[in-house]
């Protein structure tokens, strides 16, 4: 039986580990390699971001799309100093916008 959260059949982070793992194992243009520990931290932090966005949305503080848009803008700013960090934030923003 699947849980219902804010109209989603599964929680927004249900398939994120698989999607993020695929993205992290791919060879990005910048050729950044992530260890298993790095992948675990990135996945866990992304899930925490999704939980925060879901809670803000459920309480009527901020729409999930608005949170994702703000995160996307922030990813561009972060990428100016650290491209890999900016890419990771951009992936999470995109996944949030897709409603995963």
Image (spheres, rainbow, N blue to C red):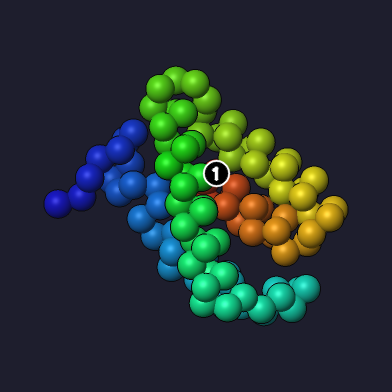
Task: Please tell me in which quadrant of the rendered image residue 70 appears.
Answer: top right
Classify residue 17 as left or right of residue 72: left
Q: Residue 97: image x %, image y %?
A: 55, 44
Residue 75 appears in the picture as rendered: yes
Question: What residue occupies the far right of the structure in this picture?
Answer: 80
Element marked by disc 1: helix
**Which residue does the image show at 14% across and 52% down from the upper left?**
1
* Residue visible at 52% across and 73% down in the picture: 37
Tell me, yes or no, if residue 99 can be seen here: no
Q: Is residue 5 above or below residue 61?
A: below
Residue, x 51% and y 54% (percent of image)? Answer: 45
Vertical comparison of 50 with 90: above or below: above
**In this view, which residue lies farthest toward the left?**
1
Apparent side of residue 54 relative to residue 32 in the rendered image (left or right): left
Residue 7, percent across and down?
32, 35
Give the answer, above or below, for where 47 lies relative to 71: below
Q: Which residue is mark 1?
A: 97
- Neighbour tally class for label 1: few under 14, some 14-19, many 20 plus, Cα within 10 Å: some
The part of the image, by quadrant, that contains residue 32 is: bottom right
């Amino acid at each position: 039986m699947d849980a219902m959260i804010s109209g989603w059949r599964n929680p927004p982070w249900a398939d994120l580990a698989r999607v993020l793992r695929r993205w992290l194992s791919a060879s990005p243009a910048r050729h950044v390699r992530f260890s298993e520990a790095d992948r675990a931290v990135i996945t866990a932090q992304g899930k925490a971001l999704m939980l925060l966005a879901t809670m803000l949305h459920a309480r009527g503080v901020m729409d999930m799309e608005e949170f994702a848009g703000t995160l996307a803008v922030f990813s561009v700013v972060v990428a100016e100093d650290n491209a890999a960090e900016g890419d990771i934030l951009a992936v999470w923003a995109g996944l949030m916008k897709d409603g995963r």
